[in-house]
Amino acid sequence: MSSGSPLTALDAPALAGIRRLNALDTVRARIALAVDLGLLAPGERLPPAGEIARALDVGEITVRRALVSLCDEGVLERRRGRAGGTLVSPRPATGRVPEIEAYRSAADDVHRLIDQRLLLECGVAHLAASNATPAQLEELRDLVARMDRAASWAEFHTCDERFHLLAAAATGLPAAEEQYGAVVRELYRYYLPYPMEYLRESNREHAELVAALTGHDPLKAVEVTRRHVEVLHRTMFVGLMGHPAARD
């Protein structure tokens, strides 16, 4: 047996493609790819730069520079006035952000990360159904309510990350929290902006999971978790590329 960690098989893949990108390029790629796939619609207003920075785990100055560059390239546009802000161009340019290719070429790695998350998160759900404290359950319910009220994909994503990491903490096992957290944070490097109607649907599954944890029902918790994670193979960009609804 190898002298390394017994959990080496669960380690995240190298993901060398996007690790060659700096923070500015990752923001440019994620927003531009969301526009290319129709997840951000023509004319849609983007959230404030500070919200985007928190959701994508980068600095606000980096986000502002990325937005300016995407405006220069015709993907986005800047409007002044009270109804202004940064919006997707009415006819956004495509094929002008070469950094997108690092994401497209990482499809196999992303599918492996989804499978790793599925394996770990089903275990998390099973244990949390037995070990979650009343305070943790209350915080999970509060996060579900906040995601229902979220005004933007950026605000939703920040709460979504907290929700899943808190569910891992509710297992009561620091090792489980560490292993799961490493995989989910790596996968979040690939998340794109999504339409709010899709995110609201996802949040209904969050509510189902909290109900299962509150009822100490590990089988129901695992069943909800399996549905919640498996769908990522189809709904993340790796499943949407080539989808009929996506732009050429």
Image: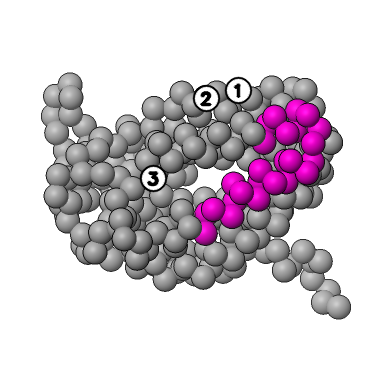
Q: Nearer the viewer, residue 88 or 173?
A: 88
Which amino acid lies under the numbered mark 3 shown in the image of this protein?
A: Pro
Task: Give the labeled residue for mark 1.
Answer: 142
Residues under labels 3 and 2: Cα distance? Answer: 18 Å
Q: Residues within 10 Å of mark 2 (few under 14, many from 20)?
A: some
Q: Which residues are magenta?
A: 209-233
Task: Give the labeled residue for mark 3.
Answer: 193
Q: Residue furthest bottom?
A: 1
Q: Circle 3 — which element?
A: loop
Name the spot of residue 170 as percent of width and height, x first: 76, 36
- Given contact means CB atoms under 8 Å apart, are the residues at marks 2 and 1 in contact? yes
Name the spot of residue 10 as percent of width and height, x first: 70, 63
205 lies left or right of 102: right
Q: Nearer the viewer, residue 111 or 207?
A: 207
Q: Of the two numbered discs 1 and 3 on the same chain, state the one appearing first in sequence.
A: 1
Height in image: 105 above or below 185? below
Q: Circle 2 — which element?
A: helix
The magenta stretch spans residue 7:
no
Q: Residue at x 79, y 41 (%)?
A: 218
- Given contact means CB atoms under 8 Å apart, are the residues at marks 3 and 2 in contact? no
Name the spot of residue 133 as percent of width and height, x first: 79, 27
What mark, if any, has residue 146 been given in the picture?
2
